[in-house]
Amino acid sequence: MLRLLPPPRAPERTSGEVFEERGYSLASRPQRPGELTVTVTVTLGDAAREHVATGAARDRVPVALWLVVAIEAERCVRRAAALVGASTSDLAGIFDEAAAVSEVREVHGSPALSQLRGYATALRNGEPTSASIMAATMPLSPAIHVGAAWAIAAEAFSISVEAWASSFAASLPTGRLAWEAASAADGQSLAEWTLLQATRRCRSANTSACSRARA
């Protein structure tokens, strides 16, 4: 069952005060800034809990945030692979390369982009996380559009969105927070960013094929 949640409250400003971003805190705001979220509760077996805890610790982010991003990244790479006719492993490598050269540039005059890039920087830097005991069930807070996409994916298998999301937990790759950081820095959703990288790869491959044919 999806439950609508409001976004975290932004700091209040007094009259005439100039708001200065002091750095995005993933611990206090473990989601993209400004997004309304829904609740999707996943069920995690022993192996899945260990895998998720290890992945989150390696990427230095809160467990729930790591799991949301990792599940959405897996959905996006599979969707992009189906659309462009490539393997998920090939596209994952392309996304890794694109994220590695992505830059978080300084922002002037756009509070919205400034917050997104602050979030992107926080993802790239990571934050110290303390070990915690994970329960067998965990509520996740994906954005509304992400939760809806998960529900549509679950419908294809005639299962609940909770069962669909839970099925990925024990095998999700680490390191895909970099995709989320790159997409946020570019002001794009993760789905938009991955599809853009995939179509660029497809266009480049087609151009190379045409060049060889003309030669």
Image (cartoon, grey):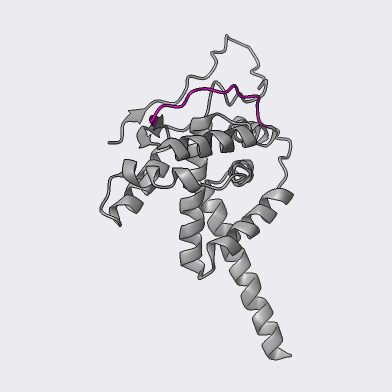
Residue 3: image quadrant is: top left
Name the side, left or right, on which 41 lies relative to 97: left
In front of the other: 137 or 36:
137
Query: What residue appears at the point 67 percent right and 20 percent down from the top-left corner?
Result: 22
Query: What residue appears at the point 27 percent right and 49 percent down from the top-left corner?
Result: 159
Up-down: is 108 above or below 195?
A: above
Up-down: is 72 above or below 130?
A: below
Up-down: is 194 above or below 50?
A: below
In front of the other: 2 or 111:
2
Could you say where residue 41 lies in the image, as x and y percent from the top left?
A: 35, 34
**Dominant SS type (magenta):** loop
In the image as oriented, which residue stretches furthest toward the left?
Answer: 158
Residue 177: image quadrant is: top right
Could you say where residue 210 lies in the image, as x and y percent from the top left?
A: 65, 83
In front of the other: 180 or 67:
67
Query: What residue appears at the point 56 percent right and 48 percent down from the top-left corner?
Result: 173
Could you say where residue 116 lies in the image, as x and y percent from the top left?
A: 60, 35
Q: Quadrant of the N terminus?
A: top left
Query: Start and end of the magenta stretch?
Result: 126-138
Name the side, left or right, on which 165 lies relative to 15: left
Could you say where residue 164 lies in the image, as x and y percent from the top left?
A: 35, 47
Residue 31 in view in this figure:
no
Query: What residue appears at the point 56 percent right and 46 percent down from the top-left corner?
Result: 188
